[in-house]
Image (cartoon, rainbow, N blue to C red):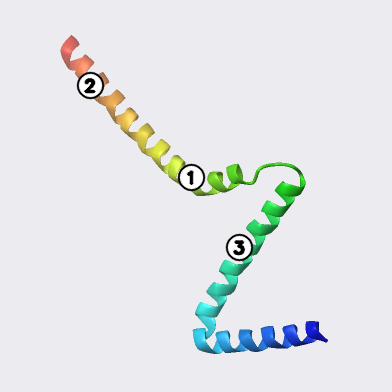
Amino acid sequence: MSRIFVLIVAFLVNIYMARYLGPSNYGLLNYVISFVGLFGFIGYVFIKLGMEPAPLLLGFILGPMMEENLRRARTIMKAARIARKKKNRTANS
């Protein structure tokens, strides 16, 4: 009986939120909740397997920043290498 009551209340809350937020914001909210659930499930599986979920979380957060900075550093090093080659050519001429 209490489970039915909880389901009815959850349904009514969802209807209220959908009307209050509108279709686009309600869809965005569901998208975010889905990602939170996915990461919660992944964390649960990691804990059950005896692995630490923190490195996975750090990888997802820091990975794009590290990739961007690596790309930037490679671009800078390539520009420095080209400048060094031009300097050596003009010095040898």
Residue at 54 percent across and 45 percent down: it is 58
From the top left corner, tell me how far across and down residue 50 is, in percent. Answer: 74, 42
For the residue carrying disc 1, how many other residues have a C-alpha within 10 Å: few (<14), some (14-19), or many (20+)?
few
Specify the label residue 31 is tagged with. none
Q: Between residues 7 and 81, which one lies in front from this camera angle?
A: 7
Q: Is residue 85 above or below residue 54?
A: above
Residue matched to label 1: 62
Residue type beneath disc 2: Lys
- The Cα–Cα distance between marks 3 and 2, rounded to whole angstroms, is 52 Å
23 sits to left or right of 87: right
Q: Earlier in the sequence, mark 1 or mark 3?
A: 3
Residue at 83 percent across and 87 percent down: it is 1
Dividing the picture into quadrants, the one containing residue 12 is bottom right
The answer to whether marks 1 and 3 mark residues whose Cβ atoms lie closer than 8 Å is: no
From the top left corner, tell me how far across and down residue 32 is, in percent. Answer: 56, 67
Q: Is residue 93 visible?
A: no
Residue matched to label 3: 36
For the residue carrying disc 2, how many other residues have a C-alpha within 10 Å: few (<14), some (14-19), or many (20+)?
few
Q: Between residues 1 and 28, which one lies in front from this camera angle?
A: 1
